[in-house]
Image (cartoon, coloured by chain):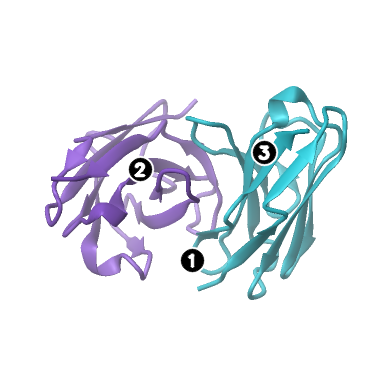
Amino acid sequence: EIVLTQSPGTLSLSPGERATLSCRASQNVSSYLAWYQQKPGQAPRLLIYGASNRATGIPDRFSGTGSGTDFTLTISGLDPEDFAVYYCQQYGSSWTFGQGTKVEIK
Amino acid sequence: QVQLQESGPGLVKPSETLSLTCTASGGSISTYYWSWIRQPPGKGLEWIGYIHYSGNTNYNPSLKSRVTISVDTSKNQFSLKLNSVTAADTAVYYCARSKSSTSRSSFDYWGQGILVIVSS
């Protein structure tokens, strides 16, 4: 099973700041990597697929980079609605999720 | 706009079978791949398995011995059965659609989730 390790566990930032989230895979997943945002009591929402493609309706302040085993989600300027938990997911070999990074208001 | 809705009992006794149904509206289930994903309270996400409208299935190896996913295209529904449940199966269960028509895909539509508690 491919294990995804997300860092940091928690990111404390202020609105307007840049957020950089990391996801590392235990094996090569090529570009089969997605990012999701989850708010309390809600289902996850797809942000990025194919490592760098924004899903429909996702603001361009969200961007994804990486391939192979190292991936990054960047939020270029945090909007108050962006404070949430973010998960990465690989679909290169079966499907697994990272443990999540919480982006909280500093 | 595809909408997914989970339904089923919110409380299941230990050792019994958890049964949930996902109803799709706004689009046909006769394409794409359809998955079940769960999230224990306060924890991360775990993929359970998928089904294709053709009946092709794939399950998480850690749950494979206890899971069955089936599809009813006439009702635009697919279902999950998880047997011999324990407290560790307590979770919010989500149904979700693959973004592409291949099995190798992210999930672009999700149900709202249903909390299932395993307790006597």
Label the purple chain with its letter: B
Mark 2 residue element = strand
Residue type at numbered disc 1: Ser
Circle number at residue A94:
1
Q: Which residue is mark 3?
A: A55
Q: Which residue is mark 2?
A: B93
What distance separates the C-alpha of mark 1 from that of mark 2?
19 Å
Q: Residue furthest front?
A: A106
Looking at the rendering, which quadrant does residue B21 occupy?
Answer: top left
Dot 3: element: loop
Q: Quadrant of residue A83?
A: top right
**In front: label 2 or label 3:** 2
The reply, left or right, for residue A21 in relation to residue A87 is right
Q: Give the residue type at disc 3.
A: Ala
Tags 3 and 1 both on a single chain: yes
Q: Is residue A11 left or right of residue A5?
A: right
Give the colour in which the image draws chain A.
Answer: cyan
Viewer-closest of B23 and B52: B23
Q: Quadrant of the C terminus of chain A?
A: top right
Q: On screen, B77 above or below B56?
A: above
Residue B58, position as x, y percentages in the image:
36, 63
Q: Residues within 10 Å of mark 2 (few under 14, many from 20)?
A: many
Residue B4 lies in what quarter of the image? top left
